[in-house]
Each structure stands twice: as C-alpha cells, then as structure tokens.
Amino acid sequence: MGQAIGQILPAAVAVAISPLPIIAVILMLFTPRARTNGPAFVVGWVLGLVVVGIVVLLVAGAADIATNQSSRAGSIIKLVLGLVLLRLAVRQWRGRPHAGEEGSLPKWMHAIDRFTPVKALGLGAVLGGLNPKNFVLAVAAATTLAQAGLSAGEDTLVWAIFVAIGTATVAAPVGYYLIGGDSAKGELEELRTWLGHNNATVMAVLLVVIGAKLIGDGITGLSS
C-alpha cells in the first residue's frame, strides 16, 4: 500500500495546485454567503474527486486491470493521459499573459457573488472532478491504484489520502477565513491577485512535469 501511495502522490499534489479553483473559492469568501458557500464548494470538490475515483476503480476492477495482460492496457492509458497533459500545457503556455498584462478569468467568476450554496457545491464538484486537468490526473491516479491490486479497504484508504491532499489548497483559504474572519481578507486578496496573474504559467509547468512522468510510467510499463 505504501508503494501505491507514493505512486499517486505526484498526481494528488498536482490536483491541489489548481490556481483557478483557489481563486474561485477566495472570491466566494468575499461575498455575503461566504460562511456557507465556501464550505459548500469544498464539499463539492471532495465529492467530484471521490466520484471519479470510484468510477475508475469499478471499471478497472471489472476489467481486472491488475493482471499482467490488463496491466499493459493501464500503461497505455497512462501514456495517452500524459500526452493529453502535454497538450493542455501547450495551450496554457500560449494563453499566459505577457509582461504588464492582467490574467483573464472565466466569465462565470463574475457571477460568484450571486451563487447559492447549491451552486457553490455544484461548481466545486465540476472543478474538482470534471475539469480537464483534474479529471486526467484523477483517472491516472486511480488507474495506478487499480494496477496495484490492493484490497477494497486499502483502495479506499489510499484514495482518501489522494482526495485529502488534492483538497488541501482549496480547503485552506476557507479554514483561514472561518478562523480569521474579515482580518484574513487582505492576505487572501493578495494570494488571489498573484494566482490570477501567474495561473497559466504555473499550470503549464505543472502539466509538463506530470505529463512527462505519466509518459515515462507508460513506456516503462509497456517495455517491462
């Protein structure tokens, strides 16, 4: 089990480093419904990651991906996902703001101040489990876990660790605000500004690193 945790750890950290969702949750903390929408977003984020993990593990279990023959299929999946991440990295890099420019944010962020807790939960679920970067990383991590051939209880524990790590950075601003209240807004605003300007660069570098790792893992699996 320890080996499986080590193998999914990079993907979990990559999920955690998600500038746009962090910006979104910080913006929610500047709205009148901060104390309900912030936690609702985090819950939705967790649910999104949990659902993706359950679906992939169930499909992998039905395909018996832990066997030698099916393990090659898992390696092919990693190789393809790595190439997808590299493609996303190129798109992020090309869309980065140049010196002196402000990073552009999605239009839906301008409506966050009107969100209800249900909408905040739904947004968290979509960004947590279905945005392209997180979805690819979660599928890759769950595939790696399925290949380890662990028991159901061990799979649950390892995936819980994955979700906890992947959630840390969106939960931290909410916890900081709930403890610090309005006095925490200044530092959160500085973080939001920095992430908004550097989002594309951070994501491009991250996707290249993780994409290269998945490609390497896939090639290793196919050549063994």
Image (cartoon, helix red, strand yellow):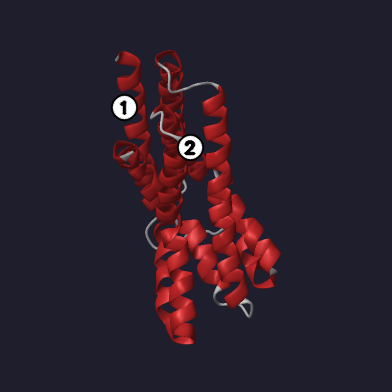
Across and down, in percent, residue 86 comes to 41, 34
Estimate the x, y position of residue 120 in percent, counting from the top left: 64, 63
Give the label, 1 or 2, closer to the camera: 2
Furthest toward the bottom, the residue is: 183
Of the 4 image quadrants, the one containing the N terminus is: top left
Observer-nearest residue: 24 or 98? 24
* Kind of element beneath mark 2: helix
Give the amino acid type for the residue marked by disc 1 in the picture. Answer: Gly
Q: Is residue 22 above or below residue 81?
A: below
Q: How many marks?
A: 2
**Are there few (<14), some (14-19), or many (20+) residues within 10 Å of tag 1?**
some
Q: Amino acid at mark 2?
A: Ala
Q: Could you tell me which residue is drawn at 38 percent across and 35 percent down?
A: 211
Q: Residue at x 62, y 73 (%)?
A: 36
Does 78 appear above or below 21? above
When the figure is inspected, residue 42 is found, relative to residue 68, above or below; the finding is below
Decide: marks 1, 2 in contact (CB < 8 A)?
no
> What percent of the width, then of the height, locates residue 157?
43, 46
Label 2: how many Cα within 10 Å (few below 14, some 14–19, many 20+) = few
Q: Which residue matches tag 2?
A: 152
Whether residue 17 is visible, yes or no, is no
Q: Which residue is mark 1?
A: 216
* Mark 1 or mark 2, earlier in chain: 2
